[in-house]
Structures are given as C-alpha cells and as structure tokens.
Image (tube, rainbow, N blue to C red):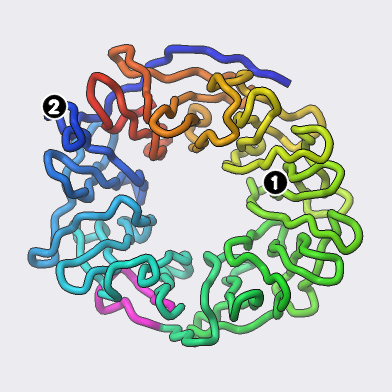
Amino acid sequence: MLAALLLCSVQDLLIDLDPTPLDFIGDSNPRQFVESSGRLFFIARAGEPDFRLWSMDDLAAIPTPVPDLTGGLAAGLNVENWMVPFDGGVLYQAPTSSVGTALWFAGGTTPGARVLLETHPVGPQFGLQPLGEHLGQYYVERLADAAVLRTDGTPAGTLVVLDAGPAYREFAPLVTLAGETYSIASTQPGSADLVRLDLGTDAWGKIATLSSAFGSDPDELVAFNSRLWMTDFDNAGTELWSSDGTTLGTGRFADLAPGTGSSFPRDLTSNGTRLWFSARESSTGRELWTSDGTVAGTTIVLDALPGSASSDPEDFEPYPGGLALSGVFGSVGREPPLTDGTPGGSLLIGPNLVPGTSPFLEVEWQSTASGLLLSIGEGFEEQLFLVDGAGSATRLKSPGGFGFNAATSLGVFEETGLVSGHTQAFGAEPYRS
C-alpha cells in the first residue's frame, strides 16, 4: 500500500550558534539532543574546533554553554560519545586533561559540568557503556574489565559496585520487569547468562545459562507482555526465547524456522502493545515479524521481497500506532515503511522517497507530537521529512527555501522535533519542526 508525498513545509532555525562564514569551523554541527526534566542538552561548537555541552530551558530561550565546575578541565565532548538523561541533568562520557576518559554529570540542582569518576585512558576498549537507571541510581559498565559503576550524580556517590573480573565480559542494557532489574551478561565467546541485579548487595544473580554454542546477543533483551524476550540456541537452532524471570520459566518460545534451521531473530523492540523483530525463514528470507505475546499471534508481517530474497528490515522506531522501519523493496531500493502489524496494514511512503535503487540508504526516525521525523539519504545527501500516521510524508525545508542536504542527529524537546540540518544559508545548525 502506498502513501502520499508532499513537499516544502518549513523547518525553523532554532539558533545560528556559529554565524561565521560557511566552512568546517563555521558549522556548529549540533549532536545528541537529550531532554531531561524540562531542559534540553546537546553538544555543538561555536567558533572553535572543540565541541561543548549546551543547554536551554525552553524553545524560546537562547542556548548557553554549560559552565565547567572542574577547575579548568574542558567540558567538551567527543562527537561519538553517549549522553543519557538522569536526575534533572545528563550523564555522559568525555575526556579530561589528566587520564583521558571520565564519567561526567551536568545539570541537576547545581548547574554545571563535573567529573564523577576518572576511569581509563581514551580508547574504545577503555570506554564506558550506559546500562540504565533503577531506584534513583544509574549503572554504567567499564568496558576494559566489565566492572559496573553506580552513581547518584555526585562524585561521592559514584563507585565501582560490581568488579566482574573474568566472570562477565559484556552486559546488555538493564531491563525492568515487575520491579526487578535484569540483564544478559556474556561469560565467554559463545556463552551468556540471564542475570538479575540484587540492589541490596549490588550482585548479579544468575537465572539461566544461555547457549554455550552460539549464545544470546547481549543487546537483545526486551520486556513485553510481563515477560523478558531474547534470542538463544538449542536443538531447534537460534530462535526466539522468553522468560518470566525464573530459571524454570526461561526457554524457547517459538521455532520460527521449523527443524534444526535457525531464524536468527534480531532487533527485538516493542511499542508496548506488540513485540517486533526481524527473522529469517527459508521461504521468505529475512523479513519483519511481530508477536502479541502468544505463539499463535507470532507471525511474519510482510514478505516485502517475495520469495527467499530478504528485505533486511532495520532502523526500527516504535510509536503508539505501530512501527516505523526501513527495508529493501525491489526496484526502489531501501525505503521507509510504516506498519501496524496487521495484514494489509503496511504503508510504503513515497514510493521511492529518495530516487534511485540504493539498498544502503541511511535512515533515522524520531517520534514527535506532530508525527515522525525521518532523515533518509546516503553520505551527505540526507533529506528530512515529517511523516504522519497515515504514511503521508512532507519534505521539510528551511525558512529561506533551502533543502536540508545533511539532516542528522534527530531529537525531541517539548514534544517538538529537532534536527541538526545543513543548509546553504546557515550551514549545519539546530532546527525545529
């Protein structure tokens, strides 16, 4: 089913942070829009090569740099680092002038950026990975040794609580189910445990040992319909598994590729009413599947490329009415459909929203009060659209009529969509939809 394409709605410039002539330094290149307790945080540069942390209290305010409370250490951020909302501010990983990598906190009751804990020298193997929040504390994994840090947002309240050592090598983000907190922890190549975090002792309690042959992907753990969902391997291959949080209640949920073949489910996600994932079956290839939490209600949504060819669905963005994603649709290449999970309930926006047949388009979604923001393109040719629930796409342009030729880093603040967009008029600056 095809939806309509409209053109030339206007996207407003939020602020020209760097009004210098358009060159590499003349772009503020804002990134990582994060809303926390009614404040917006993001990183950008203004007339200097280094990125800084900025904040604003509402869309009518002028963004200001976050003050540095560390006595001279730069509160700048590498563009690749993560940032998450916590306790009225943001937690993030950033370098310091002494050791390199540190856990930082900015905002809260004391405005400003401060180092919570210095960890290791700079490098991917020495970085930090956010796991999640529970009961007013935030947990972060130190990748060098799989130790887990716990913080309340203060230096005194930040400490190593789980020194995993050789026992565990990698953790999935924390998932809460019925008041308990769970994760999947890799033990060695091809092996993992489903674990529960005991907040009284800060210890991992093993619920079940997952496959010793192929293992469960540590990133694939989702709570839906009062159960945990993951992938694992047994004599039926690598299939969809679920757990009620107990050892006896953990096992294979469905054999989607009957026999010893594997469906290799991946990209598990939920919008609260359905579970979504991609899976592979010999007659359909890798396509989009959905489940209502029952075996009978676990089905393929759409064979987008009929037969054994795969549409390779990815870029999942759940929203209340269903799922936005991208997939390869034959002669039009990779495109961004919407689906409600029912037969005939899939909408192909466009068609051929970005002309051509490339299967390698980059797609990013962001849910907002006015619809779904969609950035789609290849290289520096991303375009920006606003998509409604009926699949109608409106291309967004700047007030001067210039198109966005590099629409990246989508976000939302006060239910309004935000984008780091590049235009001929202003360069790469923050815009609002």
Q: Give the side of residue 41 with respect to residue 150, left or right.
A: left
User: Which is nearer the eye, 195 or 215?
Assistant: 215
Give, as a three-letter code, the residue at label 1: Thr
Under circle 1, the secondary element is loop
Depicted 36 relative to depicted 423: above or below: below
Give, as a three-letter code, the residue at label 2: Pro
Stretch of the chain drawn in magenta: 147-160
At a point 51% along the width and 87% down the height, the residue shown is: 166
> Can residue 80 be seen in the rendering of this structure?
yes
At a point 25% along the width and 74% down the height, the residue shown is: 118
Residue 430 magenta:
no
Please state, as top left, top right, bottom left or bottom right, where the N terminus lies in the image: top right
> Percent position (x, y) of residue 45?
19, 43
Under circle 2, the secondary element is loop
Identify the residue under disc 1: 273
Foreground mark, 2 or 1, reads 2
